[in-house]
Image (cartoon, rainbow, N blue to C red):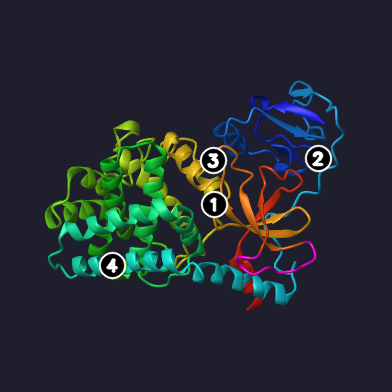
Amino acid sequence: MNTIYSRTLKPGLIFSEPVFVEDDNMLVPAGIPLRQKDINLLNTWDIETVETEGVITNPGGDSDDIFDVQESTMEKPKKPSPPSESIPTDSFNPKIKKDIIKFSLSAVEQNTGPYRSYVNFIEKLDLIFIAIADRLVVELRSVDNICSQLLQELREHRDSYIDFILGGEVTGHDLAKSSMNTGILSALTAQELKLPHHKVLHIVMGALLHDVGMLRLPKRILDKKGGLSDAEHKQVQSHPYFSSKIVTKDLFGPHEVDLIALQHHERWDGKGYPERILGPDIDIGARIVSVADAFEAMVTKKSYRNSIVGYQAMKNLIADNSRRFDPAVIRAFSKVLGIYPIGSVVLLNGDLLARVIKVHPDAPLRPVIRMMVDEFGIVYKPDEGKIVDLLKEKSLFIKNAVDPKELSGANA
């Protein structure tokens, strides 16, 4: 087994055998070029070495000077063949597909207490948005009450709320649901950054109201399924100004909330809008909401595209490389969600299916899972599958994430 220092890796290198990190977690399959985003992932999580049984195969590759050959004192079993990017929809028989879909839905339905509160929060926020759209008088206290109650819920049911975001079972109330999900993710990230409670409260309020300016845009633009014209795109980019105006003039909100409304589309590299603010000059609340909003947008189905798996959304954020987002916020966000966020469905070695139920911030590739389908094809009910901590069970590892909606579409 060859051990390679991560700092010596370069984009474009191709190996004859898969490259692994943390024992059995595949970084890149055999025959697939190493990407800069793969190297960024190693740097983000301070992973110093990777292992492979292969050699570099692409011509001109620096195969000799990057290997620090350290033969293991114990012979390790040969690694499995590289998995495909996503699980084939015909990998399970129709009955198993149907049961997997039912698993996903009933996991939320059985969690009636927190889930009911989650839906109530969305419905209350939607009523506030309707009143704002109709230019009725809205008291900031109504938003503040939601923020306080939400933070209390997150103290008691943190993991459940993350699961609801990826579950996506709530239909309708699109703006309110998106804003609520962004508020949840922003709150948890702010807490991970050890911000004081009053600051967290302002960040949650800013997250709930950051896109309220969209209510001032023409409906034809908001409902458009195709690409926007240049003129329409400029109109959409004006919504932070509208959000700021609503927060300050209509709701009489605090300055901290106004900054989030105005700056949540600014970029770390200074190429954002509306004022092209650079790096740490962007309000910390706006930086947090920007990351949470981007993740929420990726995992939520839009009129013009399907949602993507939480695992892929996390990879996209980590690969940002200090362009759009504050790297410190990305790191905190990644610790909250993990590489495989709570609620993710994953395929394990041995063709087992499981759902992630808890993440280890310091070991993001080895979460706690609950079995859904075992090696014999037996499907477990939501609360009956065996719970396995991959940090302790070294014989199991995640091959790739699975989009349950693919199985749903294949079975329809």
Q: Earlier in the sequence, mark 1 or mark 4?
A: 4
**Residue at x 62% of width, y 38% of height:** 38
Q: Amino acid at mark 4?
A: Lys
* Labels 1 and 3 touching (C-beta < 8 A): no
> Label 2 vs label 3: CA separation?
29 Å
- Local SS, label 2: loop
Disc nearer the start of the sequence (1/3)? 1
How crowded pointer 3 is (Cα within 10 Å; few <14, some 14-19, many 20+) is rated as some
Residue of label 4: 124
What is the spatial separation of the Cα atoms under label 1 and label 3, in whole angstroms? 11 Å
Residue drawn 54% across the image and 46% down it? 338
| Mark 4 or mark 3: whose residue is earlier in sequence | 4
| Structural distance between the alpha carbons of marks 4 and 2 | 54 Å
Q: Disc 4 to disc 3, how far (Cα)?
A: 32 Å
Where disc 1 sits, the SS reads loop
**In front: label 4 or label 2:** 4
Q: Is residue 383 magenta?
A: yes
Residue 56 higher or lower than 249, as above or below: above
Residue 220 position within the rendered picture, expressed as x and y whole percent measured from the top left: 31, 70
Residue visible at 78% across and 61% down?
A: 375
Q: Amino acid at mark 3?
A: Pro
> Earlier along the polypeptide chain: callout 2 or callout 1?
2
Region rendered in magenta: 375-384
Q: Nearer the viewer, residue 398 or 28?
A: 398
Residue 368 location, x and y as percent? Answer: 61, 50
Q: How many marks?
A: 4
Residue 178, by quadrant, is bottom left
Judge whether residue 18 is colored magenta. Answer: no
Q: Nearer the viewer, residue 304 or 205?
A: 205
Looking at the image, is mark 2 or mark 3 nearer the viewer?
3
As helix, strand or loop, the secondary structure at mark 3 comes to: loop
Tag 3 residue = 361
